[in-house]
Amino acid sequence: MRISVERGADRRPARGRRAGAFLLAGILAAACAAPAPKAEDAGKGSGAGSPARDARRAEVRFPDGRTFEAEIADTPARWEQGYMFRREVGDRDAMIFIFPEPELHSFWMKNTLVPLDMIWLDDEVTVIHIQPKARPCKSDPCPGYGPPRKSRYVLEVKSGVAAQEGLKIGDRLQISFPQAG
């Protein structure tokens, strides 16, 4: 295959372009040969590159004062990944999904290995819906869960936490997000 650069963008001699093309091909081949991360390793939370280590964090405070350390899911990639393939969720762990606009955000438990409580919150961080004890789903079709009205945030915590904390519709949570910088 021959690659040419048009519009005079590369005026190096052909020999220089050919060497550059070989170098680029070598880099791409090395990148493709690197082993892909395994799904079963995603939940281990150790080492650089793991979802738990790379995520920014927020503090979520329930009405009774109990706090949770929440991974922030604020990009399409993080929304899609969520708690998938994680083997455990700690008693004070959480994930807060932040969406740019209030919508009817529905969730499912495909490839999620642990049961979760899902808590939908409006713009004022008021609880509008709770899905307790959402069970893992191993094969399609997986049930979907969602609120009766638009939400801006969804908080996922270990299964049973919402009941244990006495959380109910209308309760207001406090979320401390990290400062941008």
Image: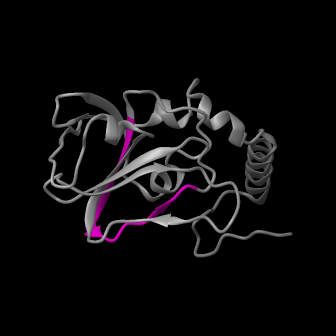
- The residue positioned 13% from the left and 55% from the top of the image is 124
Q: Hey, which quadrant is residue 17 in on the image?
A: bottom right
The reply to whether residue 50 is in sight is yes
Position of residue 92 relative to residue 35, above or below, is above
For the N terminus, the image quarter is bottom right
Q: Is residue 17 left or right of residue 143?
A: right
Depth order, front residue of 46/17: 46
Colouring used for the render: one colour
Is 39 in the magenta?
Answer: no
The reply to whether residue 56 is in sight is no
- The percent position of residue 49, horizontal first and vertical second, equals 56, 33
Q: Residue furthest right?
A: 1
For the C terminus, the image quarter is top left
- The percent position of residue 113, horizontal first and vertical second, equals 61, 43
Q: Residue furthest top?
A: 46
- The residue positioned 55% from the left and 55% from the top of the image is 109
Determine the main secondary structure of the stretch shown in magenta: strand
Is 98 in the magenta?
Answer: yes
- The percent position of residue 170, horizontal first and vertical second, equals 15, 54
In the rendered structure, which segment of residues is drawn in magenta?
A: 94-109
Depth order, front residue of 70/144: 144
- The residue positioned 46% from the left and 27% from the top of the image is 90
Q: Residue furthest bottom?
A: 7
Depth order, front residue of 123/170: 170
Q: Is residue 61 left or right of residue 89?
A: left
Label total for image: 0
- The percent position of residue 166, horizontal first and vertical second, equals 25, 39
